[in-house]
Image (cartoon, grey):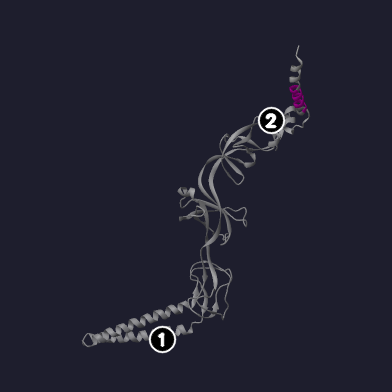
Amino acid sequence: MYSTQSGKALFPFIITVLAGLCIYLYLPVSQGEKNDMAGHATQVEAHIATLQENAVLIEAIGSARANQAIYVKSAQSDYITDIFFEDGQLVKKGQKLVQLQSQEEKFAVKELSINLREEQRQLNRLKELARSQATAKSMLEEQLSKVDATQAQLESAKTKLAEMTVTAPFSGLLGKREISIGSFVNTSTNITTLDDISIIKVDFKVPEKYLAQLTVGMTVTTKNDAYPNHIFSGEVTHISSRIDAVTRSIEVTASFENKQGLLRPGMLLDTALQLSSEQAIMIPEKAVIPLKDQHYVFAIEKGVANRVQVHVVGRHDGWVAIDKGLSDGQQIVTEGLIKIRSGSKVSIKG
């Protein structure tokens, strides 16, 4: 027979067991548990894990700039007589843009050309005399100096005359016209802007810990909200020689061919620098279940889903790269994860 004290000691244990049994019997169960109890399969959505090229990327934001960009100005001061371009026009190198009043410069060139011919005639005459008269040699040297001086004056006048015509120094896209016919311009007047957008450059920062891996020619991709479905591909063309002491980062310049003219200077660009590339199993990020410091997925085999531990090596644009735990072609659950547990029978939608 049990003593009274032994019965009192067992009483709390019996109460605890009964309470646990009641909770188990009366709490609602999940749909997946109901299906398992009934022997039915839970409907889920699935994805086939595939072995793909996995790029290790450094993402950053940069601002686009033209390959070359200037404010078009005149080297001389005078009134504008002709304008040969329209706003936003594509122009070639050397194409005429603006003509300044140049009558005075033309007359100066004409006058100096006449003077040079006369000085040259005098020089030729003195050369003939110098052959027979010794006294003519000093005069010959003086005349040579006059010819050289007149030649220099003529070249200077021709240069000034050429500067009365403003031309495009390189091929590119013009901006807004800032002047009109009859306007007086000087060396500080902005006529328009000219941008070479055949190549667009973007500067962005990379943490200094990646410095040893950086090389010119590395692949860089970029995109802009204006073209959400378009990825532009370029390469690293310059790596700064200095580390920013404040941010502990290094500035990298990437160049992108812009044959279609879609990219424009000033655009905010999301860039991704590819440091390396390797083979990895790629699966949707929504299929991964994080638990403390580990990651799991539900792998499907013969209609049964089992939880499998995987090792994540990278993430990008909603995808996860896996190097351990899955094999190429293996099927995993992507939708319906909360309705199943390891060992649940599943059927795939569609």
The residue that disc 1 covers is 111
Above or below, 244 against 184 in this view is: above
* On-image quarter of the C terminus: top right
Kind of residue indicated by mark 1: Glu
Q: Is residue 89 magenta?
A: no
Please give left or right for residue 133 compared with residue 46 in the image.
Answer: left
| Image location of residue 276, percent across then percent down | 50, 45
Rendering quarter of residue 4? top right
**What is the magenta range?**
12-22
Residue at left 28%, top 87%? 125
| Extreme-top residue of the structure | 1
Residue at left 31%, top 83%? 145
| Image location of residue 63, percent across then percent down | 56, 59
Residues 113 and 108: in front is: 108
**Sequence order check: which comes first, mark 2 or mark 1?**
1
The residue that disc 2 covers is 344
Q: Is residue 13 magenta?
A: yes
For discs 2 and 1, the disc positioned in front in the rendered view = 2
